Image (cartoon, helix red, strand yellow):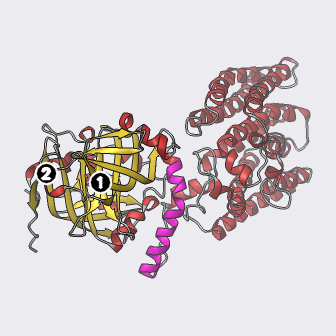
Amino acid sequence: MGVLPAPVEELLNTALVSELTVVDPKGRPVTHPLIPLYDGELIYLTSSILFSKKLEHIKANPKVSISITDPEAVKVERFARVTIKGDATVDDSDLHAGWERVLPLWREKEPAIDFFLGKRVALPLFFERAVIEVRPRKAFFWEEGRTDRAPQVFEVAPVLA
Amino acid sequence: MKQPPELIGTLEERFAHAVIAFVDSDGYPMSVATEFEVDADRGVVVLQAVAGEAQPPAEERVNVVFSHIRPQPGIGYDERRYVSLWGALRPADGRLEFTPEHVQHWDEQEMSFFEYSERSVPQAHRYLERVSAETGREVRPKLAFGWLFLRATRLPFLTATFVPVLLGIAVAAEKDGFNWWVALLTVIGGACIHLGLNVANDVFDTTSGADAANVNPTQFSGGSRVVHYGLMSLRTITLLSAGFYAAGIAIGLILAAARGWGLLWLGVAGVLLSLFYTAPPLKFVHRGLGEVIVALGFGPIMTLGAYYVQAQEYDLEPLLASLPVGILIALVLYVNEVPDRPADEKAGKRTLPVRLSKDAIVNGYAASVALAFGMILVFAAAGWIVRPALIALAAAPLAVPVYRALRDHYEEPYVLMPAMAKNIQLHLATGTLLILGYVIAIVADAV
């Protein structure tokens, strides 16, 4: 049992794509499709340095949201949609290998990652990656994905050390 | 890429839902999915209203994102595309009308992920500079030493050296006998000059801007890109190139001293052609002579040199045997230059694909292949090279898929990649079969 309600965790654990929204320096929301990984406490997303503007935006403003909206990319028995607001940090202390700490979670969801990792020589900059760690604060959950109905709202209790 | 009005008109057929993103009263970005339809005449997207706490603010600027991905379990994804629109949102008849003002989009069917990545290399460098400034230490991308060496030297292309050198050795062995240590030194020396050339090519493609301008590199074209990606410094690869040339020249001098100074003029010609392939002031490849230089260097010069150090004299037969090999290796370059041509043109490299039309290039390929295999047929039938060399004709069908790919996918760099691989196989298989023809002749002579 993690920090999020079970149906939200089920979506996070199966979604092959999510939308990460960050706030740019002009205060505009900017959304990026990324694969979400979850360990029961934090949501992890990784970003290549090739597509690293979002990392700069998070460093300037750590407030983010992650949405799971696409029925094609989520294999659950009863489709639902979720948006999670949270606070993000960027770990780029070791761009070459630091992100490999989330590889077990990534591999579980997308086994093909090992095939692509084997091609690292062909795409060296793609595999220089930062880890975005998102601590969930609030989750909005829509049964059957019906956003024309009010969502269930879950406040996330802070994790005690 | 599609322009905004056309793009908006295609949203309904390309995407199943929209995501509205906005900044809420807590300062957090909030995003919520909803259904949509497009009013193309008015240039607006009509979004279904959202209920409850997740409602976007009326009369505010928001980001509306359309994203599509088709997961292929166990493989990855395909059909990746997104359209991100920024503009004003206003309520209308219980729904939300969105007028886009600014757009950002990508569709992998219009721009491959590889090209998208290549176009993003400057952003990677900007990020690395910022991280370096934040941490107070230089942060650079890395690659394991073995992979970096493989990438920087483009080691697999050494087959272009092995074929003509081993062919020269085989011709000599069939006529006059064979010296192992001389053969070994010849292969190593030839490989050093070749690797020196490969790395030098990257030095000059970096300084000329050709690498930076090329957004469609493939594993067969576009150079090693180790400097462009920041994996190695220009100084390091310059020293690496110089080291390979120095080793190759030293081996050439040892062979000349041991086997005859007649090798010297050929060796000097080989080194100069190789060095000035991209180096100023001659820059042969910039003058449209790259294909001819490669044909000479990786054909007659290497085969005659390898023959000379074995037989200690020159002869017509190794020259004739080398001609088809020279043509086929020039065709490897010729096909690999097709995806590079926009970047080459920008950098002033007047390669044949830069100068000639698609039809001329495709027909030129077919004619050159016919010439190479016609030579093998005529030379072997006439007894100018050994008759078992005729088995090399068996490799000719490998040219067919290359020709078809050039004809049908000339503008699609990544679709051309298998054809580039097949074209390299054509050179390798033909050369190997020619060598095998000589081995058969040697065995037949001995029996």
Residue type of the residue flagged with mark 1: Arg
Is A71 rendered above or below residue A100?
above
Residue type of the residue flagged with mark 2: Phe
Badge 1 element: strand
Q: Residue furthest bottom?
A: B136
Q: Nearer the viewer, residue B419 or B77?
A: B77
Q: Which mark is residue A141?
A: 2
Query: Disc 2 vs disc 1: Cβ atoms closer than 8 Å?
Result: no
Mark 1 = which residue?
B90
Residue A35 pos. (x, y %): 30, 51
On the question of residue B108 being in view, the answer is no
- Judge whether residue B122 is colored magenta: yes
- Pinpoint the chain carrying mark 2: A
Span shown in magenta: B115-137
- Judge whether residue B290 is colored magenta: no
Structural crowding at the residue carrying mark 1, measured as other residues with C-alpha within 10 Å and reported as few (<14), some (14–19) or many (≥20): some
Q: Nearer the viewer, residue B419 or A146?
A: A146
**Residue B44 figure quarter:** top left
Instruction: Tell me the residue at 59%/51% (across/down).
Output: B215
Residue B357 pos. (x, y %): 76, 34
Badge 2 element: strand
Q: In this image, B285 relative to B417: left or right?
A: right
Q: Main secondary structure of the magenta part?
A: helix
Is A94 rendered above or below residue A154?
below
Is A143 rendered above or below residue A42?
above
Q: Nearer the viewer, residue B331 or B250?
A: B331
Residue A72 pos. (x, y %): 27, 38
Q: In this image, A1 relative to B154: left or right?
A: left
Q: CA distance from mark 2 to mark 1?
A: 25 Å
Instruction: Tell me the residue at 72%/29% (across/down).
Output: B362
**Residue A28 figure quarter:** bottom left
Residue A67 pos. (x, y %): 24, 53
